[in-house]
Amino acid sequence: MLDKLKLIEERYEELCIRSEQPDFYADPKQAAKFLKEKSELEPVVTAYRAYSAAQRTMDEALELMEGNTEPELKNLCQEEFSQAKAQKEELEQQLKLLLLPRDPNDDKNVIVEIRGGVGGEESALFAHSLFRMYSMYAAAKHWSLELLNYNETELGGVKEADFILAGAGAYSRMKFESGVHRVQRVPETESGGRIHTSTATVAVLPEMEAVDVDIRPEDIEMQVYRSSGAGGQHINKTSSAVRLIHKPTGIVVACQEERSQFQNREKCMQMLASKLYQIEQEKRDAQLTGERRSQIGSGMRNEKIRTYNFPQDRVTDHRIGLSLHNINGFMDGDLDEMIDALTQAAQAERLQRGDGED
């Protein structure tokens, strides 16, 4: 690990020197590439230098202890050695995490799909609650939200909602949200005060461009229809909404939020590319590991990942066994504590598997 860190430090220093040259910005594209690399290496170099400094402090304290018989000075040196050792061990763990291979999709925008599941109208109302939750989280992160497809019920629930969240690190923060979300609460439609259980599904895909995936035109069936609102009421007099069917896989995507048929088709192609990319990625992962992907990162839609229990003011993530007792704050988009815990669990699992080792 230390040899690898030394090479990273040398590369970082080389980039620092380059960025100070007068002609550095002569090629803006190349300059941006170098600055991005420098920014990615900086946390590793900072931690490595602190690690090296802690090691030097330990060596100096040992040297002083060996050459001195005065008890008071020896005790001071021992204390300094112990502090530096603890710091070094903490930094070593931090460096192992920083050296884990990055998910190449972490910086991408995401396409999120929410569908009502088991539970009739209550599941649609819960799907709307999840859409609101992610919208508020996106606003707190200063991400933009672009609606692609939104079908609501007469009572304000959501049959399906597809949207893009665009912003720094969107996929890295949202990728653990895929799966079945279960709610336990007294529905607005329940007059007897009984607690109901219903579900909604969430899928999170890294946003891909159509050119990134091989999609043959003859494999696509295109259908056009009118955009509609709650209860199927038409809100558009022209057939601008687009539905694409990918015949080899049976994947269906739809977009009705743009004004023109052409724009809706472009968004559909983007959604289809993301879905096909995800399928290929899962196939590759299965071949590489010889087994199903880790439960935390699998994102399988039929897996129950989280329960929202309103009577007990509790949100529980079943993958890591974490319960939070602030359900109203959580539903208002306060997701970071949960997402941080999921990220740390995934990192710990990767360390255990030795993903960062050469």
Image (cartoon, rainbow, N blue to C red):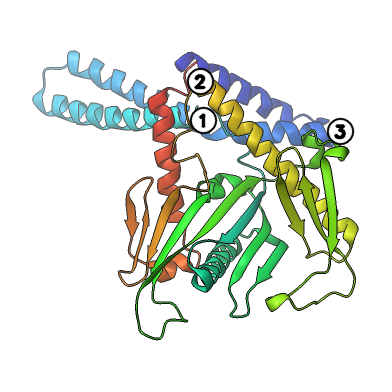
User: Is any atom of residue 169 visible in this view?
Assistant: no
Label 1 neighbour load within 10 Å: few <14, some 14-19, many 20+: many
Task: Determine whether label 2 and label 1 are within 8 Å by CB.
Answer: yes
Q: Which mark is residue 44?
A: 1
Task: Of the two numbered discs 2 and 1 on the same chain, state the one appearing first in sequence.
Answer: 2
Q: Give percent across and percent down for residue 295.
A: 43, 39
The residue at the point 26 percent across, 32 percent down is 83
Of all residues, the one furthest to the left in this rendering is: 71
The residue at the point 41 percent across, 55 percent down is 306
User: Is any atom of residue 62 visible in this view?
Assistant: yes
Q: As displayed, is residue 69 above or below residue 221? A: above
Label 3 neighbour load within 10 Å: few <14, some 14-19, many 20+: few
Q: Give percent across and percent down for residue 133.
A: 53, 65
Q: Which mark is residue 5?
A: 2
Q: Decide if residue 291 is on the left or right side of residue 139.
A: left
Decide which of 117, 277 is in the foreground and name it: 117
